[in-house]
Amino acid sequence: MTLLELLEGPLWIASASIFVVFAAFRLIVILFTGRREAEARPVGSPFLGALRTILGHFLPWRRLLGNGKAWFVTIAGYSFHIGLFVLLLFAAPHVEFIREKIVNLPWDPIPRWGFILSAQFAFAGLITLWVRRFVDPVVRLISRPDDHVAAGLTFIVMLTGCMALGEQSAFLRGLHLGLVELWLIYFPFSSLMHTFTWPFSRGFTGAMAGRRGTRA
Amino acid sequence: MTSDTTEKHRSFDKQRDLPDEVRVENAMAGFVAEFGPKAQSWMNACVRCGLCAEACHFYLATGEEKYTPIHKIKPFEDAYALTHGPFSWLHGLLGRKPKLTIEELEEWEELIYDSCNMCGRCTLACPMGIDIASLVKDARRGMYAAGLLPDRLARIVRNAEKQHSPFGSPEDFRKTIKEIEREYGIPLPLDKPKADVLMTLTPEALENRHFGVASMARVLHHLGLDWTFCSDAFEATNFGYLSGNMELQGALTVRLIDKAREIGASMLIVPECGHAWGATRWEAAKWYGAPVDDIRIRHIVEVLADAVEDGKLECRPVGESATFHDPCQQIRRGGLEEKPRILMRALGMELREMDPHGLDAFCCGGGGGVLANERAGPLRLKAFELKKRAVEETGADHFVTSCNICEMTLGRDIEATGFDKQIESLIDLIGANMITDQPPLKAPGRGAKPKGAGKRAAGAKKAGKGRSATRRKPAAKK
Amino acid sequence: MAINKRHSAVRLLWSLFLLAFLMAMPALTGNDSLLAQESSAARAEPGPPNTLGKRSDAEIWHDLRLGAGGIANPPTGSREAGAVINAEGWEWAKLRNPEKSPIVHYGAWGLLAILGLLVLFYLIRGPVGHGEDSGRRILRFRLSQRVVHWSIAFVFILMGLTGLSILFGRPFILPLIGKEAHSILLTAAMQAHNLFGPIFALFLLGLFVHFLRGNFPSLVDIKWLLKGGGFFGGHAPAGRYNLGEKAWFWTAVIAGGALSVTGFLMLFPDYLATRNTIHLSELIHAIAALVMIGFSLGHIYLGTIGTRGTLKGMVDGYVDENWARAHHDRWLEEELEKAESGDQARETAEEGA
């Protein structure tokens, strides 16, 4: 068995399983353990409050519309996330891989120029956001090692993915896949879990505000 | 109490005689004691974007990165992942020890108690909607259990525990109520065995703001309510809530609600106070394990605003312009945004809103126990600059609020900075200007405190004139 | 370059000839010249042309270069539809030949020389200081400037490493790691290089906007130059940026701009360029890259170990007042004046806004 076969076979299965099992475990612990307190008689609807906050916080807070940092975080954040999701779900090699290994995606891959463009958005966003972790005193102070590891690992995964774009080399394909697997294993134990926790975090806050007849 | 601005800064206070290991252990146990899906979701969603700093008045006023809200709970956050997170067993297997140390806790005491009003402004700025104020409250529970809180706050907590209220004992209360009755010539129902409404008060009102108490009573009489004070359940403020003493918080809330049930009340009124509203209206359920449905917990501002809307309460128009300071626990976190504004309209005042106001308003800087914590004084004054600027920009004649803590804080900060505005109580204004058949309040006698707010309301015009004269001051100073 | 000159006359003749040929084409069928007859005969015949070997090599080349006679069939839509072979590519190939290219040759020596000089300077002069710290800080770079600087620095290093691999790979790396590994390295380098190129251009634009102020020439630059920039002792006066920094800024802007433009041409050759422009672009690209990388070595040296306290300015944004006095005295004066006149320059300059 070659290394690539190993990476595409058992190691892929193993890392994907770790990702699924532990991410699910962590979500279950977050959502179903600990104390559940009785809540006060509501004034407004907790459900609508949750919905409002979940949707509302996709945009910067109105008080920060004149704030350069908020705009930077918002634009760079969206640039990175949208670019990354397009790459993840629509890039031709990914569509092929997902169809082969997981599920038959109903959509067609994007053309090459689409890939290049999304990669640029993703990289530009990630690089500027990561650089800011070092030079903004506030963000530097609050950044944990985990935040840097997560950013670095994501960057390397994206970089090797782009390097393998020629699809000529098994080595480059293996390198990318190996790093993806490392990333998958790291994921459930890290702040990358925000991928799944954000609606709950926003939702609970929104529900609290809704219950109290205020907005968050 | 007046040494706010001169008190030398100390990095931390310690209470009780505990070995450091026990303090650390208690701290962590206290922090996670009430963790459930909510707090766990918040703890696992932060991506360190730093936008919370842009909302915090302490950061905005100082530019110091340590006041970034999420940083205020950092030691707890770090240790949480290792000891209580979903993978604590894995960290255990890997031999990774909890990171929380006594030095860290001591260092963080200032950030947790002095530089957070739990005003919840950062929650609005957070892309993830993390309610950092709630997490700071959890951290305070840990700090209280570790015996690491500002001494002054600890003293007030002890008073609240031992003598019923930071104000004093039931006996003190009875004496003061009688005194106010005499001063203002208004009957104050006390310890009625049965009543429909249980009215509560703040220590500040009992100490310094007797006119406010009389005003409130007069409105309640006017509305024809069957109400009473109870000398064994008069205290609305909850220093358990502010300090992180969970048992005390529960005991104080339960005392009020049990008393209301005992006298057969259908309504419990929370006075002009912010955190009392949060503790009583929004957190009482957790001590009973069910919503308190038999007793309506209402805020005095709410009661009055509803009376205005129902046509039961009218006021002589005061005229003039006014700006309203939004107490965060009533407005942003309390859902009463419209109520004080209804009252301002009823007073015929031209409302000039501050920028920011309403849900986005800056906190007075004294909430969350910060006012009680003298060493935070200098920092608080810096944050006050933001509020001051916002008030100045409105050019309003009156500066009104509906929370005793805000009023005290702003009053002291106004005094310390020589700002030419006075802070007025909305209830006092209503009390002084309501149209009623109730006998008028007696002019305050010798026993009255010089802070009588009635005088203030009457003298507002003068203050308004003085404003323009002194407004040039800041420019000249520069 | 002498080679070029010698050949340009030949090239001109060729061109004129081709032009005449091209213009004659439509009339060919009606012409009774030998060539015309042959061509029309060839066209009339089914199957591949010239199987009988009736045409000379020169004619075949001729046709290839122009796509005449249906021989050439490059992608339609291309700007050079019809041309299969470009004779001028020969010149380019010589300059680009990995083993003999003067660009590779002088480029490698040039970069090594710069590195050597820096090491030598460090050994002799050591880090430049500014005496004791004053303890008072002054804001030198806003947050947005710092973010832009390090973002482009990051991409520049990535572009530099991948680009140098492409330029120097064959002569220097291939012998070390062998053909297979080298081919992998190069395809990876090329993909990354192509991908990060536009990001570099975007960040360069940001760099230009954020650092333009203070980078225009001024009289004090001459004084600075006469004092040897303070590199060899003594104090050299400077404003917000000294002459060296200004030179670096404009080098980065011009060389970086050239890199971006030629890079784009090479990224989309079918749509933006002809073969000749591509050749030219590649040469300009390589030279501009070497210039920028060479200059960056000096910049990196001075920004890190070369001058004490400089790096802090680009990380925290603040520098010590004595640092500013030593290296940018005029700027410090201005800032202090501004601060005094109540403009709250020190400490409070709004971060990142």
Image: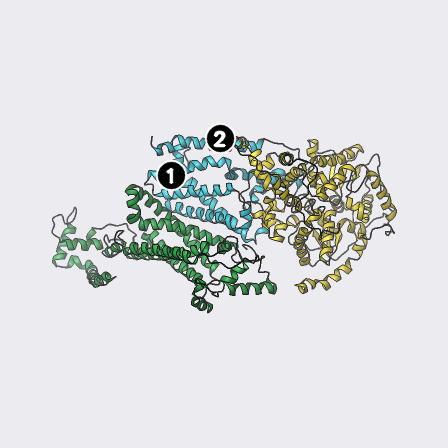
Chain colours: A cyan, B yellow, C green
Pointer 2 residue: A21
Give SS at disc 2.
helix
The number of numbered badges drawn on the structure is: 2
User: Furthest-front residue in view?
Assistant: C124
First along the sequence among labels 1 and 2: 2
Residue closest to the eye, B281 or A27: A27
Amino acid on which disc 1 is placed: Leu
Chain at tag 1: A
Q: Quadrant of the C terminus of chain B?
A: bottom right
Residue C317: % across, % down: 52, 55
Is residue A201 toward the left or the right of residue C1 in the image? Answer: right
Residue occupying image coordinates x 37% and y 47%:
C192
Crowd tier of the residue under label 1, counting other residues whose Cα lies within 10 Å: few below 14, some 14–19, many 20 or above: many
Residue A50 shows in this picture:
no
Pointer 1 residue: A175
Chain at tag 2: A
